[in-house]
Image (cartoon, rainbow, N blue to C red):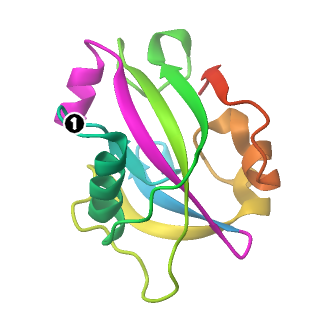
Amino acid sequence: MLRPAWLETAMTSPRVSVRAVVIREDHLLLSQYKDDRGYWYVTPGGGVESGETLEEAFARETYEELGRPLPFGEILFVREIIADRHVDSALPAGFHQIELYIESKASKGPDYHPIVPDPAQIAVVWHPLQELDQILFFPKGMVEEFQNQSWPKRYYGDMR
């Protein structure tokens, strides 16, 4: 399996990532991927590089994955993923990522298209919030929070 360089770094120390939460007309903006499990989805975003602020990484990652940067809003919540604690994880052993989910807004206009897609990223889609439980969405354990657009905790800990 082809592994991006950031994945190898995350296997030696925790990786910090920023993710965009963009909801418009009861749809969530998602990056779509395909691998041997089929299609799977995450909110757009990615790793903070050395020397970058969270806001700079957010602008760069949303530009790369969506074709234009999104505005950096409030931090909604933080979650971690530690692959070694999840039997069903498709992530490599040693992978540990801390993710900050950032509220953002999407402008109306042309569709979003990846400029520099992640390996296995095939599209950007608007998915109905009420059908989020019908797809392979990560973080799996937070479907209800996304559907209700409510994050009662700021730190959700380790979850797949």
Measured along the vertical axis of the image, is residue 40 above or below residue 13? below
Kindly identify which residue carries mark 1. 49
Q: Where, quadrant-wise, is the C terminus in this rendering?
A: top right
Give above or below for 90 relative to 146.
above
Q: Position of residue 25 (x, y in %)?
A: 71, 76
Q: Residues within 10 Å of mark 1 (few under 14, many from 20)?
A: some
Q: Is residue 114 on the magenta stretch?
A: no
Tell me residue 80's x, y (percent). 52, 23
Residue nearest the viewer, comparing 32 with 47: 47
**x%, y% of residue 95?**
37, 19
Residue at image coords 46%, 10%: 84
Q: Quadrant of residue 142?
A: top right
Q: Is residue 24 magenta?
A: yes
Q: Who's the residue at 73% across and 61% down the image?
A: 129
Residue sitting at x 75%, y 41%: 151
**Which one is nearer the viewer's eye here, 141 or 73?**
73
Q: Is residue 90 above or below residue 29?
A: above
Position above or below: 98 against 27: above
Q: Is residue 50 left or right of residue 108?
A: left
Choose between 51 and 158: the one closer to the eye.
51
Rendered location of residue 1, percent (x, y): 25, 35
- Tell me the magenta residue range: 1-26
What amino acid is at disc 1?
Glu
Task: Give the structural element (helix, strand or loop) at label 1.
Answer: loop
